[in-house]
Image: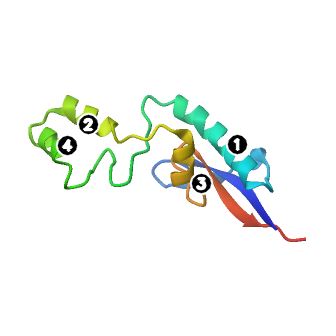
Amino acid sequence: MKGYVFTFGYDDFGEDVAPAHEEGIYLNFDKAFKRLCELNSKMLNSKKKSPFFEKGYSEDYYPDNDIELKQAEETKNWELFDTLLNKHRITDIEKICSMYCVNKKPYFEFYAIEEIEIFE
């Protein structure tokens, strides 16, 4: 039988993960995913900006073929750079949870969900 448990990312440097036993064990993935979205929505709302980006983007890198970002960086137009980069931030909580939070290490100060096997 499959079950779903939560983990929490509590250290940005060592990528430390703690079990979130207080959230219990779910037998239904859809209910567990809904709870994951609720938990991470609270965390996301406490941040000034979403730390999650579309694939290929982050605070530190972007695709080579993104000419606008490249020009903004080369001219050191940091305001334009931030504006362009922010277009690639993900703020939809369901998208964030499905991309970053299922069977993966939780991002710092966010929850992840793991599938476990439950034996009788």
Q: What type is the residue that disc 1 sits on?
A: Arg
Q: Nearer the viewer, residue 15 or 94?
A: 94
Q: Secondary structure at mark 2?
A: helix
Q: Secondary structure at mark 3?
A: strand
Disc number for residue 84:
2
Disc number for residue 69:
4
Point out the tag, 4 or 3, that comes first from the N-terminus. Answer: 3
- Figure check: 83 above or below 90: above
Q: How many marks?
A: 4
Q: Secondary structure at mark 4?
A: helix
Point out the tag, 4 or 2, that comes first from the N-terminus. Answer: 4
Disc number for residue 17:
3
* Nearer the camera: disc 3 or disc 2: 2
In whole angstroms, how far apart are the C-alphas of marks 4 and 2?
Answer: 7 Å
Question: In screen coordinates, is 97 left or right of 113?
Answer: left
Q: What type is the residue that disc 4 sits on?
A: Leu
* Nearer the camera: disc 3 or disc 1: 1
- Asked whether residue 20 is in view, the answer is no
